[in-house]
């Protein structure tokens, strides 16, 4: 896992086609904007965990 520090307005690029940008950062809260091709699935972690919990 790669851990980076970013400030609002800064971004990272993954595999030359996914952009993850910090759009807001307040006391423990972070807002990200993710720009990715339509065929890339983006799912919040808590939804994946809940789905996996319900499958077991």
Image (cartoon, helix red, strand yellow):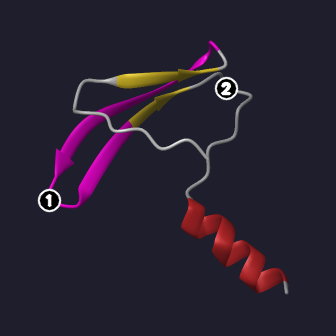
Find disc 2 in the rendering and name its residue. Answer: 38
Q: Position of residue 24 (x, y in %)?
A: 21, 40
Q: Which residues are magenta?
A: 16-32
Marking on residue 27: 1
Residue 29: quarter of image = bottom left
Q: Position of residue 6 (x, y in %)?
A: 31, 34
Residue 18 part of the magenta-drawn span: yes
Residue at the spot 24% in from the left edge and 24% down from the top edge: 9
> Which residue is pictured at 34% across the width and 38% down the height?
5
The residue carrying pointer 1 sits among few (fewer than 14), some (14 to 19) or many (20 or more) residues within 10 Å by Cα, namely few
Would you say 31 lies left or right of 8 here? Answer: right
Closest to the observer: 47 or 11? 11
Residue at x 62%, y 43% (from the top left corner):
42
Residue 49 sits above or below residue 12 on the image: below
Position in image of residue 44 (x %, y %): 55, 57
Q: Residue furthest top?
A: 16
Apparent side of residue 46 relative to residue 50 in the rendered image (left or right): left
Please tell me how crowded label 2 is: few (under 14), some (14-19), or many (20+) other residues with Cα within 10 Å: few
């Amino acid at each position: 896992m790669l851990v980076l520090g970013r400030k609002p307005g800064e971004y990272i690029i993954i595999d030359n086609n996914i952009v993850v940008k910090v759009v807001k950062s307040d006391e423990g809260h972070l807002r990200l904007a993710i720009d990715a091709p339509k065929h890339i699935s983006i799912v919040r972690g808590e939804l994946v965990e809940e789905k996996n919990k319900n499958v077991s």
